[in-house]
Image: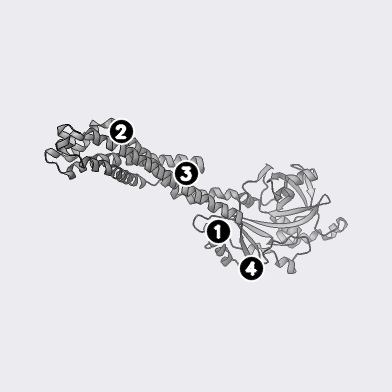
Amino acid sequence: MYRRIVLKSVIMRKKKFLIALLAIILGTSILAALLNIYMDLNTNIGKNLRSFGSNILVLPDSGQPLIADGSNTSGAGGDKFINYKSVSLDGGSIKEYIYAYSPYIYGVSKVKTVDMVITGVDFDSIVKTNPWWKINGSLPDSNDLKASVIGINVAQRLNLKEGDEFEIEMPGVNKEDKADTVSSASVAGEYEVGNGHKFIVKGIVKTNSSEDDQVFINLGAAQGIFGLKDKVSLIQVSAMTTEKSVEDIMDLVAKENKGIKVKAVSRISKAENVIQNKVQWLILLVVIVALAGTILCIMSTMINSVLERTKEIGIMKALGSSGQRIGALFYGEGMLMGLVGGVIGGIIGLLLSQIISINVYGSQVSIRYWLIPASAAIGVLITFISSYWPVRRALAIDPVITLRGDE
């Protein structure tokens, strides 16, 4: 009987309750969508923040990257570089926190009699740690020992364009003596560049930073030219900070590898923390505003319903209905709307979260079906809270005054 009375009451006032139902659907759909996005927020933001570049630097034990000039081949100078093959960044407890890493070896050599910074890199990994690079041409294969990418300022200064060939002179060696010393590149073994150290421009990069003044060649080729097999000046690391802070990941890297120094790129790290905190607060603010609007709309509808049914409430009281029964009627109406609106809102919210994630992050979020019953429970809770004051208003009605027509 109670369910029939509640259902009939809602149907008779369907136009008014439809507004409240729409408010519940809107509120719970926004809540479900943002909650579903929030669950994957750190992962999605972490991946997108990698467009800022590396947030950790792995440096030699001296704490400063050394520039190769041809004189520091093995001995003391070679020891000041990082032994790249002995560094582990893709295994053990570190692997799951590393998005990408890229080794660099810096040197100074002459190109067309002009001193240039020669940078040996792994072309496959450098695009992950430097996603903002704009290359006019193509990115060389990581196994191509003759390919190069030059900065736009280098291209203009040396009048080079895509497809041109240029020669890198051995550092610290006169051109006349080069024929006798070129075989020193064999220090790098399988990375031997060959006679002449000639390279072909595959692409021209523009970064609006120091990279525009550098010549990028294959890492092995650079190690061969500078006589530093397996050595690098530094390693840029792009770490995911979704589960651990930059400092914690740095500690892991330092523990797994000896003879190195680990340093955070403070500008990038601070920017990531600021952005993550701001997005989290923004989501929280939107949820609060949506729920507040929903509560006010339902409360307004319930108050209007009480005012319209003042005489009905008076008659019910006069016939002996208790306050609990009258309150249960209004609470039942509200909770029915909350249940229906919450279920619909949960379904819409899951669909909405996918649309938002694809457009904002470029990827889908996980579908969490438990958000549908959770939205229904939240919808019921919202209507219960919203009905509290209107129900108190209904219970305060005096049946004598109401039936006499004074109210």
Query: Is mark 4 in CB contact (under 8 Å) with mark 3?
Result: no
Helix, strand, or loop for circle 2?
helix
Label 3 sits on residue: 364
Q: Residue at x 69, y 55 (%)?
A: 219
Res. 91 in view: no
Q: Residue at x 75, y 42 (%)?
A: 163
Identify the mark at residue 246; answer none if there is no mark: 1
Query: Is mark 2 in CB contact (under 8 Å) with mark 3?
Result: no
Mark 1 or mark 2, which has the lower sequence index? Answer: 2
Mark 2 or mark 3, which has the lower sequence index? Answer: 2
| Residue neighbourhood size for the residue with mark 3, other residues' Cα within 10 Å, grouped as few (<14), some (14–19), many (≥20) | some
Q: Amino acid at mark 4?
A: Gly
| Residue neighbourhood size for the residue with mark 2, other residues' Cα within 10 Å, grouped as few (<14), some (14–19), many (≥20) | some
Label 2 sits on residue: 18
Mark 4 or mark 3, which has the lower sequence index? Answer: 4
Helix, strand, or loop for circle 3?
loop
Q: Amino acid at mark 2?
A: Leu
* x, y percent for residue 296: 34, 40
Helix, strand, or loop for circle 4?
loop
Between the C-alphas of marks 2 and 3, the distance is 32 Å
Q: Residue at x 76, y 47 (%)?
A: 154
Between the C-alphas of marks 4 and 2, the distance is 69 Å
Q: Nearer the viewer, mark 2 or mark 3?
A: 2
Identify the mark at residue 259; answer none if there is no mark: 4
* x, y percent for residue 321: 14, 41
User: On the rendered image, what quadrant is the C terminus found in?
Assistant: top left
Q: Nearer the viewer, mark 1 or mark 3?
A: 1
